[in-house]
Image (cartoon, rainbow, N blue to C red):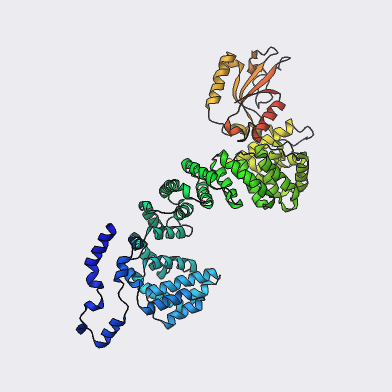
Amino acid sequence: MAAHLVRRCCWRHLGPFLCPSSAIPTSLLSGKAATTRRALPHPPFLSFHASSPRRWADGFSVKEQVEESGSAEHKVIEELIETASTPHELLQLSELHALNSNQASLVITQLSRLAAEKKLEAGSILQDARFQQLISVTDSQISQVWNNTLVNLLKSLYCLGLDSSSREMQSVEQEVLWRLRRLSFRQLSSLAEFLAPRESRDSKLLSEIIKKLELRWTELEGTRSVVALMGKVGHISPALMDRLEDKALELAEQFSPDDIRKITLALAYQNRRCVPLLRALSYHLVQKHSELSLSVLMDLIFAYGKLNFHQPQVFQKMTTELQPLVPSMTPVELTRCARSLALLKWLSLPLFEAVAQYALDKTKQLSVTHLCGIVLSFARLNFQPSNSEDFFSMVHEELQGQLARLEPPLLTELVWSLCVLQQAKAPYLHQVLAPDFHAGIRDDQSLKAQSLWLKLIHINAAAQLESPDYKGPFLPTAALGATAQVAGDRLTLLQSSLREALARLLGSSQHGRFDVRTRYGWNVDAEVVVNSENKPLPVKDFAAPHLLHSEGTKPLPPGARRVAFLRWEFPNFSNRSKELLGRFAMARRHLQAAGFLVVDVS
């Protein structure tokens, strides 16, 4: 009904201007003019009325609709532009025909396309006098260029590398800026996708386009636009990204696996953990899509890991599909896969066994960096392959003579991981515990350096408690107190409940220590000393070699034991089992080696 009313109004108001030649008295035309008028095609009035409002919304004005079916000469020129296969043919058109601004814009757009397809040097095109003439024609009649052609013209000038400060480029940008309200949503989104990677956030044109998208987001249709805008423009405007997430949730069932990959990557890169959308995408991924390509699987694992979003059904599906693909992976893909799954704390035994076998079969294809990535992944999950002896023999052989070439952060992570896996030999320990190595890390106050220093303290503890053959050097005792500067966890419900229960059980605050920071870099939730009859003793009366500064001096009575209560919560475990992650398994091991009787609380 609305479309019908629009047509009626157009007929009433535009009819006098678009009337056919038969309505003009022949006496008003000269003979030649009359003949010419009769020879012209029938005016496109009927086609204008037959055109749909949707087409108007695509950026064609009424004038553009009429001119679209222009003279035969114009049609011929446009066909020549479309069929031209070389820049020379296109530039020659400007010499053979008097082009209007719209046709000149079409030629420039086609030049840009050919230059991109054939990888031509754009500089020679820009310097050609005929191209300068095209730019001049376009600039002089810029207001007559159609909307769609104008959008493509701006993109083409960017692609050809025209100086952004030139008058012609600024003229085109200004014209686009003035016409933003008349552009369709599709044209606006196309411009935003194109300009976002090229322009800074301070760009006036890009800012105005994004404002228009924010206001007109209800016009958004189809999955392609949603996916493209989320990936290319969403990071610039959080408000627009909110709307795009809502629209993506609405269209979740229609997304292909590649669409889901792009959306999850966009969320990951922007660190937006939109749980309802991620759940919907995960559901349709499991229910509808039977097989996923390697690239999709790799990107999905990375995105889920980056967002720390745990979806067991999705992980099970991905690891099952990844396992047979492991032998065909490149070293980069293999390392990325292992690191992402480790980040997700998802230990798939068959898959990681396949990773270990890949490393053994294709050792020569793996660089030291790739090998380090695999070892770090195994350590995080505390995974020991079934062919552990062969695997670590290969690792030690490949790392021989390579340690000094590694960057300090990577070397520290590597040795720490080998300590977790109980594979750190004396040369590794000596390399990172030497004063000239750790001096730079110790003096650095950044969060990353503090994390590395804490791992050096763990390595130092492993050298003291688990490597009897290692004779030094060790970290200076005064430096071990740096662990106190590493922020502890917030008080959790389990932690507070443990303290309350122990306080009631012990009866006196003298019988226990809470939140104990040891010289080994590990925290003990509660420490109790019990005699041979398991009755608590005043803990502060006795010497405590695990502390930097002991309050007591008495040795433990015969039969007395130190008890360490360690609190384990969900983040401390692998997602597939009740096994502790590598870091926490090493903490438990070290405290036992230091003489504690460990009580696990979970």
Residue 181 visible (yes or no): yes
Residue 413 visible (yes or no): no
Q: Quadrant of residue 392?
A: top right
Quadrant where the image shows the N terminus: bottom left
Q: Residue at point 66% right, 35% down?
A: 582
Q: Depth check: 18 or 578 in front?
A: 18
Q: Depth check: 132 or 266 in front?
A: 266
Number of numbered markers:
0
In this rendering, position of residue 346 left or right of residue 168: right
Q: What residue occupies the far bottom of the structure in this picture?
A: 31
* Percent coordinates x, y for residue 216 in the rendering: 36, 53
* Percent coordinates x, y for residue 220 in the rendering: 40, 53
Q: Quadrant of residue 60?
A: bottom left
Q: Quadrant of residue 453?
A: top right
In this rendering, position of residue 73 left or right of residue 198: left
* Percent coordinates x, y for residue 482 in the rendering: 62, 34
